[in-house]
Amino acid sequence: MVRPIPAAFVAGAHGEWRIERISPVRGDPLAGAPRLARIEVPGTVPAGVWTLRGTTSNERYLTRAERDALRAVQPPLGRPDSDRAALIPIRKSDAWWDLAQDERRRILEERSRHVSIGLGYLPAIARRLYHCRDLGEPFDFLTWFEYAERDAQRFEDLVGELRSSAEWEYVEREVDLRLAR
Amino acid sequence: MVRPIPAAFVAGAHGEWRIERISPVRGDPLAGAPRLARIEVPGTVPAGVWTLRGTTSNERYLTRAERDALRAVQPPLGRPDSDRAALIPIRKSDAWWDLAQDERRRILEERSRHVSIGLGYLPAIARRLYHCRDLGEPFDFLTWFEYAERDAQRFEDLVGELRSSAEWEYVEREVDLRLAR
């Protein structure tokens, strides 16, 4: 996982995941489609209603201690009982990106407990973060989550905790896609 | 400068800058060419001997205090008396990218004084950093420098200071292009 992994999310007629709902949380929505394909290391990408691209990258805020704590419990993607998934594209405001590194870190963790909150939902919820701001994409981040149906309420709690944090005041566009296998 | 600015550097027969020399500092070299074009917000890019792409991005390590200190003295690109330039593409090792944020910060500034060293050469030397690791490019960073011929020795000193730092132990590929208008 040290090398960046490029990925494409294609909404359309094909793909492993059935789109159950697409909710615009803030800002412009995304068009509806029956299915979603998550394609890592995409060569040619099939045409779709829309395509979002991103890439895994190095971590931007985690301390060594936080990363060790996360890695000790975070599950892989693709678990057989993960029959639910979510894709949450977000874009943060210019005000966020104009903050210095120490200021963003302070809001993300010391004020909003982003890392600590996420840790509380492991290993139930698997997660992969794709960065896309520097790719010229409409969003800054695409976060992919996988979990079992029995943990669906826990996932709602996780999303609710993050959305009520100080960090989320800097989110100017967010769409929430829920998926089932 | 909050929004990322994509850029392409094209080496070939055309471009504002004459390539005086291309020195492989570490790892594979880059092919020679007579001229270099630096194209920001590239649409179609002219064909060349080689093309390197990158994008400006948010700062990854600077504290607010460091950024304020830099912004107070850093000059713009394109000064009329900046008749010399350098393009220094580097790639860092997997060992660097596998460090946590606090570990990278500690090596970059507390041990290597990267920001403090750069500050000592302002406003003589103008600089713009382009990120390219997440674009799937062969380098991680392209740093562009502009200065007047009278400051050429100061630029050598700057580059020498950085190359002797602990941070540079993580640089596994580096090429040094010097240019004149």
Image (tube, coloured by chain):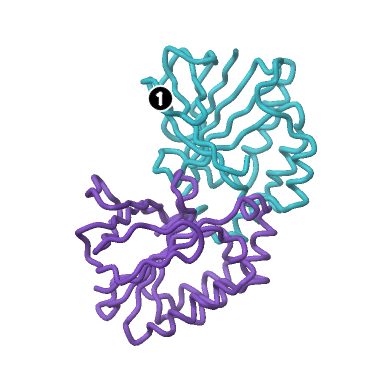
Chain colours: A cyan, B purple
* Quadrant occupied by the C terminus of chain B: bottom left
Work out whether B176 lies above or below A77.
below
Work out whether A110 lies above or below B44.
below
- Which residue is nearer to you in this view: B8 or A117? B8
Residue A13, x across and y down, in percent: 42, 12
* Quadrant occupied by the N terminus of chain B: bottom left
Badge 1 amino acid: Val
Quadrant position of residue B44: top left
A14 sits left or right of A112 in the view: left
B32 sits left or right of B72 in the view: left
A78 sits left or right of A4 in the view: right
- For mark 1, give the secondary structure: loop
Residue drawn 44% across the image and 45% down it? B135
Which residue appears farthest toward the left when viewing the image?
Answer: B14
Residue A170, x across and y down, in percent: 53, 47
Residue drawn 68% across the image and 65% down it? B106
The chain to which mark 1 is attached is A
- Which residue is nearer to you in this view: B97 or A98? B97
- Which residue is nearer to you in this view: A132 or A120? A132
